[in-house]
Image (cartoon, rainbow, N blue to C red):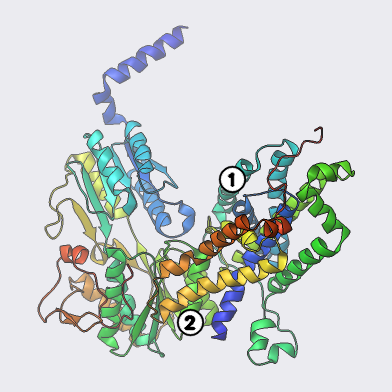
Amino acid sequence: MEQLILTVILTSVPLIFAASGELIAERSGVLNLGVEGMMLMGAVSAFAIAMGTGSPILGMFAGAFAGALTAGIFAFFALGLATNQVATGLALTIFGTGLSGLIGAPLVGHAIDGLPQIHIPLLADIPILGMLLFQHDIMVYLAVIMVGLCAWVLNATRVGLIIRAVGDNHDSAHALGYSVLGVRLLAVMFGGMMAGLGGAYLPLVLTPHWAEGMTAGRGWIALALVVFASWRPWRVLGGALVFGGITIMQLAGQARGWTIPSQFLSMLPYLATIIVLVLIARNREFALANSPACLGRIFHAGK
Amino acid sequence: MKKFFTTMVAGAFAAVSGVSAAVADPVKVGFVYLTNPGDHGWTYAHEVARLDVNKHFGDKVETTYVENVPEGPDAARVIRELARQGNEIIFTTSFGYMDPTLKVSKEFPDVKFEHITGYKRSGNMATGNIRFYEGRYVQGVVAGMMTKSNKIGYLASFPIPEVIQGINAFALGMRSVNPDAEMSIIWVNSWYDPVKEADAAKVHIAEGADILAQHTDSPAMLQTAEKAGVHGFGQSSDMKAFAPKAQLFSSVNNWAPYYISKIEQLMDGSWSTGDGPDHWAGNTWLGMADDYLVLTEFENMPADVKAAAEAAEGKIKGGFNIFTGPYSDNQGTVILKAGEAYHDGNLWNDMNYYVEGVNGKIPG
């Protein structure tokens, strides 16, 4: 059983990174549908650098950097040239999928060792709990720290207040003298960095090789997760574990011969997201509480 | 101007005398790929074979491929375009191209079409496939002898005949050496999702499996096995580089002899959709005996297991029909009595059960 829980934790990590990054971008009012593309760019860069230098840690930084850079392309168009965010985001996913395949072509067929597990002294020796919580690779801890950081910055700091102000009413924020595009650029780049880290987790830990399109739709689940979490960081963490738990439960159910059709369990994360969307749409107060009012809307300073 | 005029004349002449020009021109061969060669699995194996075709024929052929072609109606557009570009024989390399290929084959009666893994044929459309299940019988023998927990974990993609054949062939091989061993199946509902494949492998291991097998395309399962210290088998191409200690062997799809023989038939005019093996006209379905399916070196196993694996491989190459009675399904119903055996048609039409030794039910 604890082995299964461990699997749930690990499989949730890419979702936690990607979704909490996207959450910050969306709270600033930018809908970036390019998460899948940014994750793939992060994955291929992380693998290339980890293989070339022999250091998975450097690979991790490369993944974060590549993700941020890819997000920069989105920012150039969607913020700089005020293009439609939905179309630009979709284009970014297609672009990232293609470019990562091109860069990764010579890397196919190689394997690396991946990130080592860190045994935290004493705590790691606690029965069961030690294995579940204190024997992970560095990126698991980093994921939790980043969620905490996002929550703290958003809710308890001035920076968070500015991000939320820009996302909720960009005209007012502009009138108050904040650089709407500047804030959004940083938020989008941060989202890209986190998506890059989420992507990097695949070739660095989960499946230590590179293969084209290896994220297989996790970027889209991360997008759903942001809505599922109703734009609250800690709920992203919980939601990622729920999504991961459902995935593993349906696999384990099959191995144990449960009679629930696996297709039904496969659709549960999406079903949950739709239900949350319906709830948000029906409950205006709930929606107003968290959903950024200017999400996806183009900002023109002159208006 | 004069030069331009000469070119025009030469061009017109070449067009008019197309027949004589064709003698010197290379034969154009088209390929349609489901994903891209970067998958290191199914499409990669086709790409390796295409390069072998180029090597074998040199400048006598000119090959073209289109990658990442989605299955379904849109594929017809790609196939039609390849036909229009003058490809004389077109290989469409996935099950879902069956109907589009059939449709285009009727529009271009002079072009030959070869559809991989399907069953529909026409006057100028034949089919080709590999007996993948033969390698899985050998895997079953090795797994049955190697397992200590008597639990085998199997990753499956979709419940289509080819995959069911593989599961049952594996189980028959396993039960031929170990009547106590059991297989459990996890359907990943994808040909290719590395993370989900790795997750499913971890689940199998957590449930006690010590040998893993896969009918999915990525090396993720073997990498997971390597990390956990258990063993497994690779799929489509040699995956030793990913799991040097865990891989027992890989079943490698070798499409080159099929491609080469079909192109040779086209060149010497003997190409037809005529009789294939076992009353299946127009179908090329060969396996280990003809090197269409190749097993990599048997590794990471004791000498007696290796000997048994070699014996099983030799037996199949010698013509042994794996689906020979007596055997029952996993509900205890007798499927074949002693002396009875399946024909190829039975493999596609009648195999809607798991044999003894496989847990659970076929989904859907």
Image depth: mark 1 or mark 2 in front: 1
How far, Cα to Cα, is label 1 from label 2? 38 Å
Residue B205 is marked as 2
Q: Is residue B229 above or below residue A236?
A: below
Task: Return the residue nearer the eye: A303 or A189.
Answer: A303
Do labels 1 and 2 touch, CB within 8 Å? Answer: no
Q: Position of residue A303 (x, y in %)?
A: 80, 33
Task: Return the residue nearer the eye: A116 or A295.
Answer: A295
- Residue at position x 44%, y 84% from top? B210
The chain carrying label 2 is B
Residue A286 lies left or right of residue B341; in this view the side is right
Answer whether residue A289 is visible to the viewer in this image: yes
Mark 2 Cα-neighbour bin, 10 Å: few <14, some 14–19, many ≥20: many
Residue B143 lies left or right of residue B279; in this view the side is right
Residue B208 lies left or right of residue A166; in this view the side is left
Answer whether residue B246 is visible to the viewer in this image: no
Q: Position of residue A109 (x, y in %)?
A: 51, 61
Mark 1 Cα-neighbour bin, 10 Å: few <14, some 14–19, many ≥20: some
Q: Position of residue A247 (x, y in %)?
A: 51, 71
Residue type for callout 2: Ile
Residue B274 is marked as none
**Occupied quadrant, residue A3:** bottom right
Q: Secondary structure at mark 2?
A: helix
Residue type for callout 1: Leu
Residue bearing mark 1:
A90
- Residue at position x 67%, y 78% from top? A136
Q: Secondary structure at mark 1?
A: helix
